[in-house]
Amino acid sequence: MNDTEFWRQKTYKNTEFLNSPEARNIRILCELTAPKAQFEKNHIENTIVFFGSARSVSQVDAQKALEAIKQEKQSGTSFDANIDERMAKAQAALKLSKYYDHSAALARKLTEWSVTIPQKEKRFHICSGGGPGMMEAANLGATQANGESIGFNISLPFEQAPNPYQSHQLSF
């Protein structure tokens, strides 16, 4: 076995252990300590936390999705027996999309206000779960205002990946 293979196997076993039930207390400690260290390094004392659905989308994206389903249905080429159900879900997503857009606008306005506070340690940072939907909207709004934002991501077997709008150094 060469050195590269030895370290690859060792790294896999460390990762396997860290994801095991026995290492849960270590993961919890890291999940508390790493953000605390970054907050101190970046002089972050105040946050504004956004909560909301991971499945919400912007009005533009919701409208595009609805139009695509309408075209599919009108063309008669769809073999999807659930097209009416998909249409209803797309219509519901369009109704809720205003909240995504409002969240992005609010986060942008809050960030624009916060960066005017002279003392960096007294500024507020937008904070979210770091995923898609309303979390993405919050981080997007802060980015539009040229501010930093925090993303507390979670590990799920599917669905969640860090959204592209959270500040890299504040993505946990």
Image (tube, rainbow, N blue to C red):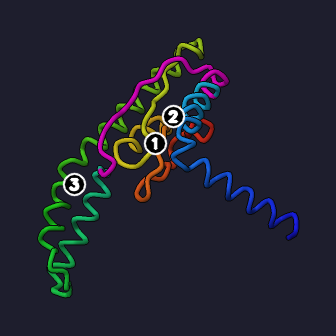
Q: Give the label on residue 150, or none.
A: 2
Q: Give the label on residue 93, or none.
A: 3
> In the rendered structure, which segment of residues is drawn in magenta?
38-55
Say which amino acid is labelled 2: Ile
Q: Position of residue 44 (x, y in %)?
A: 57, 21
- The structure residue drawn at horizontal position 53% and vertical position 34%, both measured from the top left corner, is 28
Q: Position of residue 33 (x, y in %)?
A: 60, 28
Residue 124 shown in magenta: no
Say which amino acid is labelled 1: Gly
Report crowding for label 1: few under 14, some 14 to 19, many 20 or more residues within 10 A (C-alpha): many
Q: Which residue is mark 1?
A: 130
Report crowding for label 3: few under 14, some 14 to 19, many 20 or more residues within 10 A (C-alpha): many
Q: Secondary structure at mark 2?
A: strand
Q: Secondary structure at mark 3?
A: helix
Residue 40 shown in magenta: yes
Number of numbered discs visible in the structure rendering: 3
Report crowding for label 2: few under 14, some 14 to 19, many 20 or more residues within 10 A (C-alpha): many
